[in-house]
Amino acid sequence: MSEGKKQATWGGRFSEGPAELMLRIGESVSFDQRLAPFDVQGSQAQAAMLAHVGIITEAERDAIVAGLDAILAEVEAGEFSWDTALEDVHMNIEQALTQRVPAAAKLHTARSRNDQVATDMRLWFRYACGQLDASLAAVLSSLVDLADKTKETIIPGYTHLQRAQPVSMAHHLLAYVEMFQRDRTRVAAVREQANVCPLGSGAIAGTTLPIDREFVALKLGFVDAAGKPRVTQNSMDAVSDRDTFIDFASACATIGAHLSRLSEDFILWSSAEFGFVRLPDAFTTGSSLMPQKKNPDAFELIRGKSARLTGNLQMLLTMVKGLPLTYNRDLQEDKPPVFDSLDQALLMLDSVAACLPGVEVQTKRCAAAVADPALLATDVVDYLVEKAVPFREAHHVVGALVGLSEKLDTPLNELPYDQVAPIHEKLGEDWNVVFDLKRALAAREKPGMPGPKQVEARITYWRDQLKD
Ligand code: ARG
């Protein structure tokens, strides 16, 4: 028997089996076998519905459900033998079931692989979003913990990668907490979008058989907040829609971009030039040639992998853009990018969550970097503005002071008062009180600012949010 003859599910009208290359290009079981738990869940709900409307008997339903449980147990034990000649996870499971349970020949009634795979993937997206949310929450917790330890550590904040104004390291880290919290919202929106049941859409135009779509939806937990079933409203859209794939890949790409920026900060901070932190040995590597090296490989790989996440999104958008309605086989290629996005995003998030607790803050290096009084030049401007000097004029005046400091090669805060006073009448003898980091931060206590009370309040807020 040629391999192709195994193709019992759709082989009826074919006199010749598929070419070896057709099998190779056509199979998806090598990657979609991970849908097995969702495929089994979907098929069990389908069997329950078919019995509910009287298309199969209760005994047939029970045999199908039990047979599927047994197959899933084998899959989970690694004992199920997958056959690429049977193309995909759906036909592998159905074929195995039919060999064991005669009633399984009725399972595919009123169903197509088109609505079946759409259902499996929606179940998978719900699961995947749950996984991502848990890993995002762990990253948030580790960032909040590190923020808590670095409330008193003042570092320069940067714009254009030039020292700008002082902030606590905690405030810097909490910026990422905001980002990852937005990611959680995005992931929750993807889950919500996935949570609608496409089963019953058939191949394209539903079915003439008396199925009960709401029954299946309820069984699979595709329900709204009130527990009402949610079913797709256009069969053609339901079998060809890949928006959830795109939105999922997009959420992962954004997570990747955030992780990549975080990685870049830690790569810089751990360099000899910055020296703000030491990374844990467990998340760095050495050089095969240079014995002194300690390389931030985990963060570099996260930065690199973020490109992969962007690529997966790009692939999906490109794949769907020219497809006529409805299902086209191109769509089988939709799964590797989202599986990869989940796997990589989880690996990246989990690595960050595990690495951050081992980060050691080099407080002396931070203090040295932030000692540059020029970081408080803006506060001198504010000092003048408080004395009713127009902002533009004040900015100009402080520019002159900075110029003087460069000319005299003297730190801004140490300029002799007799040279400062002539620059502007409002520069009182107390002009240099602003050169005090504690004062500078304590003066920034409006919402969102880096004042210590604000930062403390944010830490408390996030701890509370992350409790459950
Ligand atoms: N493995 C297929 C996929 O993932 C299942 C749907 C096949 N549908 C079809 N009409 N050949 O896209």
Image (spheres, grey):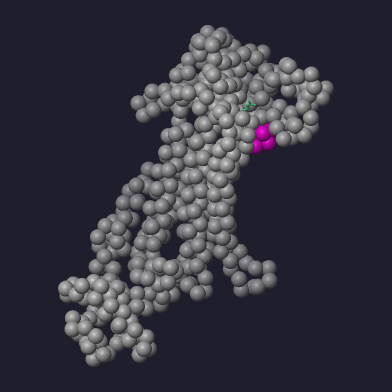
- Report whether 310 appears left or right of 383: right
The image quadrant that residue 161 belongs to is bottom left
Task: Pinpoint residue 70: horizontal percent, then vertical percent.
Answer: 63, 24
Write down the region rendered in magenta: 27-32
Q: Spot the residue most to the right.
A: 1
Above or below for 345 versus 143 = above
Q: Residue at x 74, y 28 (%)?
A: 85
x and y percentages locating residue 115 in the rendered image: 56, 24
Q: Is residue 387 magenta-colored? A: no
- Name the image quarter holding the C terminus: top left
Per the picture, the main secondary structure of the magenta-coloured stretch is helix
Q: Is residue 338 visible?
A: no
| Residue pictured at 39% horizontal, 62% vertical | 172
Q: Would you place residue 3 above or below residue 157 in this image?
A: above
Image quadrant, ligand 1: top right
Residue 29 located within the stretch drawn in magenta: yes
Vertical placement of 310 versus 263: above or below?
above
- Residue at point 54%, 11% (across, down): 209
On screen, 220 above or below 109? Answer: below
- Residue 153 position in % (x across, y down): 37, 68
Q: Is residue 379 left or right of residue 57?
A: left
Instruction: Find residue 337 and report its horizontal and vertical position in percent.
Output: 59, 42
Q: Quadrant of the N terminus?
A: top right
Q: Is 370 placed left or right of 328 in the picture?
A: left
The answer to which quarter of the image holds residue 28 is: top right
Query: Which residue lies at the image location 56% right of the left edge and 64% below the top edge?
Result: 296
